[in-house]
Amino acid sequence: MSAPTADRQGTGVFSETRARIPERTLRTDRWWMQSLWTNLGFAAFLIYGLVRASWQAAYYVPEYHYLTPFYSPCISASCVPGSSHLGVWLPEFPPLVPLAIVTLPFLLLFRLTCYYYRKAYYRSVWQSPPACAVAEPHSRYTGETRMPLIVQNSHRYFFYAALLISLLNTYDAIVAFQSPSGFGLGLGNIILTGNVILLWIYTLSCHSCRHIVGGRLKHFSKHPVRYWLWSQVSVLNTRHMLWAWITLGTLVLTDFYIMLVASGTISDLRFIG
């Protein structure tokens, strides 16, 4: 029997002991639907985020201090007056350069290296493998030991950055409770606050957070506080995939609402102030 070659049927499984099945899979269900929906979801968010982050307009409502997360922190001289909650640290940016350039790369890398997102785009984008009992089209596998995938091992460090950015988003949400008459509450406040809460849940449900809180302990009984924290994070961690998708949606919802109000398309629904 001749040795298997890398071009045989594009199966991606070339072991000599593998049964010689010409089909890529014997599954008869629509196994490709999950990959399709995942790709569509990622593409929709990335396109929307790219357009909005480089738009440099309709991101701040001065009357109610609404600042979209896509532009926080706005620390450039290009920012509209009042939107620089932390002050102006940088000169004007060229057109199309995101005003939140200091945080967006860290947020993107935090999501890209996330354990759930890795599984999602490994299967849907790289087809490695696309589904259970479906052979992948690749002839080689090196894991996360080479560039660029070796960067995945830095996820815990991006988690620390995400914690700081979550604190910043919390500050932005608190500042937004100011209105011309003092304390104010509008639909924008509810959306901003809800988004921040969900972002915290997603961040704290991270696998790295679970390891940081309860990892490297030989006896939980000797560390009751850390054990309790680990237990709470573990509850959140079981729904990490759900929080990952929900927060993509709430980020878009928050930005879109603030864009509509900032552009004058709609008025903020006010309850107080």
Image (tube, rainbow, N blue to C red):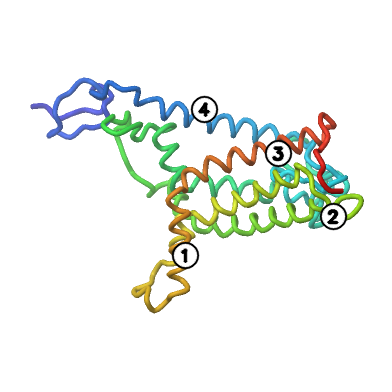
Residue indicated by mark 1: 212
The residue at 78%/37% (across/down) is 56
Residue situated in front as seen by the camera: 105 or 86 = 86
Along the horizontal axis of the image, is 199 left or right of 234?
right
* Tag 1 near tag 3, CB within 8 Å: no
**C-alpha gap between disc 4 and disc 3:** 20 Å
* Tag 4 near tag 1, CB within 8 Å: no
The mark that comes first in sequence, 3 or 2, is 2
3 or 2: mark nearer the eye: 2
Q: Extreme front residue here?
A: 271
Please state the horizontal and vertical placement of residue 242, each as a whole percent of the image: 49, 43
**C-alpha gap between disc 2 and disc 1:** 38 Å
Please state the horizontal and vertical placement of residue 53, each as a whole percent of the image: 70, 38
Indicate the amino acid at tag 4: Leu
**C-alpha gap between disc 1 and disc 3:** 31 Å
Residue indicated by mark 2: 183
Residue situated in front as seen by the camera: 169 or 80 = 169
4 or 2: mark nearer the eye: 2
Residue indicated by mark 3: 255
Up/down of 8 relative to 191, above or below: above
**C-alpha gap between disc 3 and disc 2:** 22 Å
The mark that comes first in sequence, 4 or 1, is 4
The mark that comes first in sequence, 4 or 3, is 4
- Disc number at residue 252? none
Q: Quadrant of residue 2?
A: top left
**Judging from the image, what secondary structure is the residue with disc 4 in?**
helix
Residue indicated by mark 4: 40
Up/down of 163 relative to 21, above or below: below
**Neighbourhood count class around disc 1 (C-alpha, 10 Å): few under 14, some 14–19, many 20 upward:** few
